[in-house]
Amino acid sequence: MHDTHPTTHAGSCHCGAVRFTVLVDARHASRCNCRVCTKIAGTTAIVKPAAFTLDSDPAGLSEYGNEVGTRYFCPRCGVHCFSRGHLVELGGDFVSVAINCLDDIDMGEVQVLYWDGRNDNWQAGPRATPWPIVPAA
């Protein structure tokens, strides 16, 4: 895949109510074509839970979950900041951090890979081009 060089980044939602710190190589991110990720336009990086620290009160988060994980977002400004989940294909427990929420990132410098979550095709791994979305019959 690629060599990683994680560094510590501070992140937040738009209004600043949700704050976190993460150790991640933010030069590399991914996008998923599942129905939720498509609608929120998430560009994320996957880290182990130990690399993520929520710096704000967890009681101040709103959440939305499914069988893959739970997404956490700010109830005031609506920004989706991170999710927590478990997938064997991703190495077990993970935190998926919204790269767009990192305070010091130039999105033009981020290399993006694409997952086929809409078809539950995690075993295929990420690829350099988006997966096609096939309309339901």
Image (spheres, grey):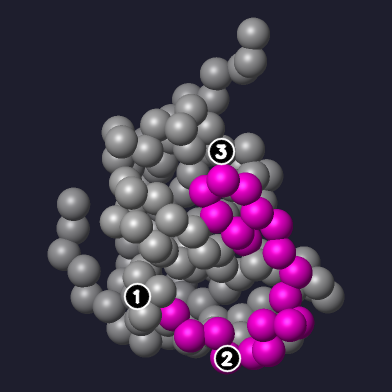
Rate crowding at label 3 as few (under 14), some (14 to 19) or many (20 or more) other CA atoms within 10 Å. some
Residue visible at 37% across and 80% down? 50
Q: Is residue 23 magenta?
A: no
Q: Range of the magenta residues? A: 52-71
Report whether residue 109 is seen: no
N-terminal label among 2 and 1: 1
* Nearer to us: label 2 or label 1: 2
Rate crowding at label 1 as few (under 14), some (14 to 19) or many (20 or more) other CA atoms within 10 Å. many
Q: CA distance from mark 2 to mark 3?
A: 29 Å
Q: CA distance from mark 2 to mark 1?
A: 16 Å
135 vs 44: above or below: above
Residue 24: numbered disc? 1
Picture quadrant of residue 127: top left
Location of mark 2 (residue): 55
Q: CA distance from mark 3 to mark 1?
A: 23 Å
Residue visible at 55% across and 63% down? 83
Q: Is residue 1 left or right of residue 121?
A: left
Location of mark 3 (residue): 34
Q: Nearer the viewer, residue 86 or 96?
A: 86
Q: Quadrant of the C terminus?
A: top right
x and y percent of residue 57 in the render? 68, 89
Residue visible at 45% across and 67% down? 95
x and y percent of residue 1 in the render? 18, 52
N-terminal label among 2 and 3: 3
* Helix, strand or loop at mark 3: loop
N-terminal label among 3 and 1: 1
* Helix, strand or loop at mark 2: loop
* Helix, strand or loop at mark 1: strand
122 vs 6: above or below: above
